[in-house]
Structure formats: structure tokens, C-alpha cells
Amino acid sequence: MFGSLGLPELLILLAIVVLIFGVNKLPKLGKGLGEGIRNFKNSVRTEEKTASEEDEQVATKDANDA
């Protein structure tokens, strides 16, 4: 999808973003986007950790029941 975008197209997109949001809001927008990505990654890691702990508890319980 983005493989066909070259430098001129990216510069045009950047110019449009600057016109829409303004130069002053771009750092805030980037910071908010970075924090959102970081929070998403943390929640995925937490969910994976919780799921693996639950799997270990089930395996331990099954081993004790047998």
C-alpha cells in the first residue's frame, strides 16, 4: 500500500499535516501517539503474562488432580 509512495508524495503529506494541525501542535500529537502505542504494548504484554500464568495454574491443578 505504502510501497509506491516516494519522497515527493511524503513531503506533500507532511505539508498537509502541518497545515491541518499547525506547527505548535505537532510535538503534542507525536507525544500522544507515542504514549498510546506504549500503553497498547504494555497492555498486550500484561495480557500475555496473565494468560501464561493462568495456563501454568491450570497445568499445575491438572497435575495435582491426576
Image (cartoon, helix red, strand yellow):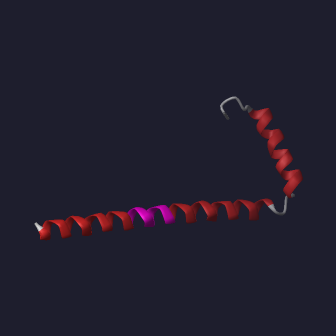
Say above or below: 6 vs 29.
above
Please identify the quarter of the rendering in which residue 4 is found.
top right
Task: Looking at the picture, tell me which residue is in the foreground, 27 or 36.
Answer: 36
Quadrant housing the C terminus? bottom left
Secondary structure, magenta segment, majority class: helix
The part of the chain drawn in magenta is 43-49
Residue 44 falls within the magenta-colored stretch: yes
Say above or below: 26 vs 12.
below
Say above or below: 54 vs 26.
below
Q: Residue at x 80, y 40 (%)?
A: 11
Q: Residue at x 87, y 58 (%)?
A: 22
Quadrant housing the N terminus? top right
Expressed as whole percent of the image width and height from the top left, the position of residue 15 reads 85, 45
Task: Looking at the picture, tell me which residue is in the foreground, 53 or 4.
Answer: 53
**Left or right of 21, for residue 54:** left
**Left or right of 15, for residue 65:** left
Q: Residue furthest right?
A: 19
Please identify the quarter of the rendering in which residue 62 is found.
bottom left
Q: Residue furthest front?
A: 65
**Left or right of 34, for residue 24:** right
Expressed as whole percent of the image width and height from the top left, the position of residue 47 reads 44, 65
Residue 50 falls within the magenta-colored stretch: no
Q: Residue furthest top?
A: 4
Please identify the quarter of the rendering in which residue 26 is found.
bottom right
Q: Residue furthest left?
A: 66
Expressed as whole percent of the image width and height from the top left, the position of residue 33 reads 67, 60
